[in-house]
Amino acid sequence: MSKILIVDDEKEIADLVEIYLKNENHSVYKYYSSQDVLKDIKNIDIDLAILDVMMPEMDGFGLCKKIRDLGFTFPIIFATAKVEDIDKINGLTIGADDYITKPFQPLELMARVKAQLRRYQKYNTPKKEENIIDFRGILINNDTYEFYFNDNKIDLTKTEFAILWILCQNRGVVVKSDNLFELVWKEKYYEKDNNTIMVHIRHLREKMNDTGKKPKYIKTIYGVGYKIEK
């Protein structure tokens, strides 16, 4: 459960976003005024903020700048009817992390919230480096058996995970087929076992949408084994 700040002077929109966030089991701090937020912000714990831009007294741009000036680093998403590119650029320049235009689909906003929280938690949570590998859009966690590819969580079988983990551990180096088989299956390798490895490699490529003639990630070194480039 994450703690989300909503600031929007349009009560109906703020209330709707609150419903969707609570349905995702998030805790919500809801305000209809920038000034009210600034009175409380030092006393509340926030993981992410959703700010409207066009508000009276102090707009979302001003509020975002104040939040950053106070030293808060949590992600900020602007939700606004202003669609000009210069507005988006201004928002991102002063410290926002994402920008969604009104009217928006609540489910799209929830997807953006999840993406921003995932990035924030990834870079702000202490981690055991030896059990987490993060490179080229691949994030694989050997503690939780989770695999993210370009910020999308992908479910792997136990065997697929084991193969990918070994290749990621040895990125830039060819892992020979016999070594890979014996590490994953804990059995002696025979020539016929290469077909078993090939099937699992194909499934991994399909899940990573990397099935072309020249895969960008898991590469076959014919007659030797497989490798992932650094």
Image: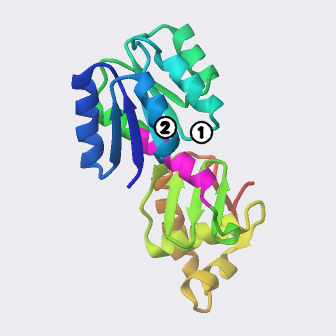
Span colored in magenta:
113-125
Q: Position of residue 65 (x, y in %)?
A: 59, 23
In reply to whether residue 204 is colored magenta, the answer given is: no
Residue in front for this viewpoint, 67 or 101: 67
Q: Main secondary structure of the magenta part?
A: helix
Q: Residue furthest front?
A: 39
Q: Is residue 210 visible?
A: no
Q: Position of residue 55 (x, y in %)?
A: 39, 14
| Circle on res. 197 | none
Q: Residues within 10 Å of mark 2 (few under 14, many from 20)?
A: some
Image: 196 above or below 10 = below
Q: Secondary structure at mark 2?
A: helix
Residue at x-position 41% and y-position 47% = 3
Image: 62 above or below 169 = above
Horizontal side, residue 150 vs residue 100: left or right: right
Q: Are marks 2 and 1 in contact (CB under 8 Å)?
A: yes
Which residue is label 1 attached to?
Answer: 72
Question: Can you say which quadrant of the picture contains the N terminus?
Answer: bottom left
